[in-house]
Image: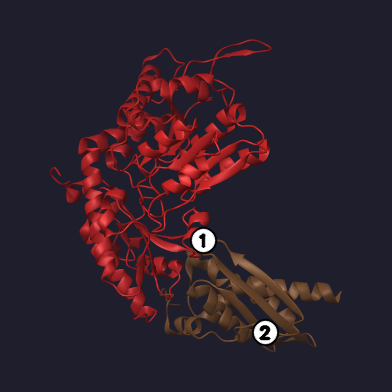
Chain colours: A brown, B red
């Protein structure tokens, strides 16, 4: 796994994020901050038959946090909620294709933390 | 300006500056966060533990006497460094934060009441904001702020005058900003505050390590600073207080060493400065601070200031020649008002990405809000900024490496 964080794919997602924007009629929304970098992230999801049918994010911050949000939202579209919950830090690392190291771990994991929060909100609403 | 300082020779005194980070020789540009330590200071700690480790103010045996003498002599050195008149005015604490809290808790408890005003500035580190917020809340007092001038360079005297008209009980402000590097005219501000009847505390965390300071010339009541930013270890800091004001203040912590005598129901406090130092002190830290002062005085505070001014001017000039890079604080023409701190931003790149790429080149810089969120987010309107800060072991070659790292950041992020 490359030590260099700023590979082309990360920069590209940072500069041209996928799935970025507001969402009308979302089933759940969740906001999370990373006080280390001052990154902020909000994730909106729509759920159909236990799967993520649509997802978008809004936020600002460092390249690692924003690229991770862009890639994760691509990655989980159509995925079962239970599968999403299993992604974890290792899954994020694999998805990013880089090792962000301990100093930037909180940037890399902000998106999965926020998405997990959104799923929690969705399940809580449903129950 | 006298003879410049010999940076290559100084670098050799700092073992850590010989290490490699990401296969590159470490370039340390984060001394505003904490300074590196010379072997003379590190050795003094080793000597204490291998030659005379004992508690102070207690033992009658030889090594205890030596420990007491070294600890006390450190206070004499610190007092001399800042132009104090005796060690009775030098209280050792953990750091600047604890020093300010000691004042807000002990002096503040006695002197601030409901409806009173407390005046600080928009330029403060959280350590000079939060203790006053806590005090204001507890007492029902109001916390007011001195604004920055339009250039975001120094404090606005118009704003200061407006706030002083409210007759604040205390004015607490930073001597040198840890974000902007601005050197406030502490003597002028103190004079104005005193005229308005206020007690004055100066946060000297970023000034004492870098320039000559004379508390009696400044005319302040309290002056706070940290050892770890001036070559000494962490966990040792200083609160200077005028003797008369210290005498009136109640002790903050009770315990050993801060008492003269104790019976079942009461105690008699010890003399100054020990009245404020309950329990066994950070003896190694206190002793090492004395050796740090020796090291700084050997170079000379005037020469340190001149050197940092030169490096800062060089950095501002170098960065001004790079497109889409913005620096904050006083400009090139105002180097007299500027310490060795240069905060900057690169258009479209988050400061933490900047710092990570600097790290890949072995360069340590700070990125974030620098524990001054009201200033960075409220006044400068930035989420975060990158900061390089200089000390005696930095020179123009370090700035050149930083400038190269900025070019690398711009290349990676395709900034024009």
- Discs 2, 1: same chain: no
Q: Could you say whether the residue bearing mark 2 is in a helix, strand or loop?
A: strand
Pick whichever, B59 or B298, lies toward us: B298
**Residue B360 figure quarter:** bottom left
Pick whichever, B169 or B254, lies toward us: B169
**Residue A115 figure quarter:** bottom right
Q: Residue drawn at (26%, 71%), measured in percent from left and top? A: B321
Disc number for residue B377:
1
Q: Which residue is mark 2?
A: A55
Q: CA distance from mark 2 to mark 1?
A: 30 Å
In-image side of B297 versus B155 (left or right): left
Above or below, A19 against B160 in this view is below
How many other residues sit within 10 Å of disc 2, few (<14), some (14-19) or many (≥20)? many
Pick whichever, B213 or B69, lies toward us: B213
Question: Which residue is at the far right?
Answer: A127
Q: Residue drawn at (44%, 29%), measured in percent from left and top? A: B221
Question: Which residue is at the far left?
Answer: B3
């Amino acid at each position: 796994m490359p030590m260099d964080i700023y590979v082309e794919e990360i920069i590209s997602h940072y500069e041209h994020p996928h799935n970025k924007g507001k969402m009308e009629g979302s089933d759940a929304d969740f906001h999370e901050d990373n006080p280390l970098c001052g990154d902020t992230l909000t994730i909106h999801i729509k759920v159909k038959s236990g799967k993520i049918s649509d997802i978008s994010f809004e936020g600002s911050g460092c390249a690692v946090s924003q690229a991770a949000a862009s890639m994760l939202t691509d990655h989980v579209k159509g995925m079962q909620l239970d599968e999403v919950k299993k992604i974890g830090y290792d899954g994020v690392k694999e998805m990013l294709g880089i090792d962000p190291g301990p100093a930037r771990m909180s940037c890399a994991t902000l998106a999965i933390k926020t998405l997990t929060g959104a799923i929690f909100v969705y399940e809580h609403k449903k129950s | 300006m006298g003879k410049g300082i010999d940076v290559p020779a100084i670098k050799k005194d700092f073992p850590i500056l010989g290490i490699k980070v990401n296969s590159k020789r470490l370039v340390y540009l984060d001394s505003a966060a904490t300074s590196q330590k010379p072997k003379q200071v590190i050795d003094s700690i080793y000597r204490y533990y291998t030659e005379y480790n004992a508690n102070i103010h207690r033992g009658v045996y030889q090594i205890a006497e030596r420990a007491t003498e070294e600890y006390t002599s450190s206070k004499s050195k610190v007092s001399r460094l800042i132009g104090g008149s005796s060690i009775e005015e030098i209280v050792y604490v953990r750091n600047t934060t604890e020093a300010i809290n000691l004042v807000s808790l002990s002096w503040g408890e006695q002197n601030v009441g409901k409806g009173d005003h407390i005046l600080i500035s928009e330029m403060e580190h959280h350590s000079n904001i939060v203790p006053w917020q806590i005090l204001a809340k507890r007492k029902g007092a109001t916390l007011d702020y001195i604004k920055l001038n339009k250039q975001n360079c120094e404090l606005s005297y118009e704003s200061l005058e407006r706030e002083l008209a409210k007759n604040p009980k205390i004015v607490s402000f930073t001597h040198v900003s840890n974000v902007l590097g601005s050197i406030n005219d502490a003597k002028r501000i103190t004079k104005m505050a005193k005229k308005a009847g206020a007690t004055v505390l100066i946060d000297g965390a970023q000034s004492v390590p870098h320039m000559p300071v004379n508390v009696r010339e400044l005319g302040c009541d309290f002056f706070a600073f940290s050892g770890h930013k001036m070559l000494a270890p962490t966990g040792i800091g200083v609160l200077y207080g005028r003797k008369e004001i210290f005498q009136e203040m109640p002790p903050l912590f009770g315990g050993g060493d801060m008492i003269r005598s104790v019976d079942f129901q009461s105690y008699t406090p010890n003399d100054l400065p020990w009245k404020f130092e309950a329990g066994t002190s950070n003896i190694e830290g206190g002793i090492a601070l004395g050796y740090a002062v020796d090291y700084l005085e050997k170079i000379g505070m005037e020469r340190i200031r001149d050197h940092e001014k030169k490096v800062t001017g060089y950095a501002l000039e170098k960065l001004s020649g790079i497109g889409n890079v913005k620096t904050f604080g006083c400009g090139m023409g105002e180097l007299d008002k500027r310490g060795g701190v240069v905060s900057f931003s690169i258009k479209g790149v988050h400061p933490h990405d900047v710092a990570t790429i600097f790290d890949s080149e072995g360069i340590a810089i700070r990125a974030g809000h620098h524990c001054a969120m009201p200033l960075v987010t409220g006044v400068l309107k930035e989420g975060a900024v990158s900061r390089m800060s200089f000390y005696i072991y930095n020179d123009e070659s370090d700035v050149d490496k930083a400038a190269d790292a900025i070019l690398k950041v711009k290349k990676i992020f395709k900034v024009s």
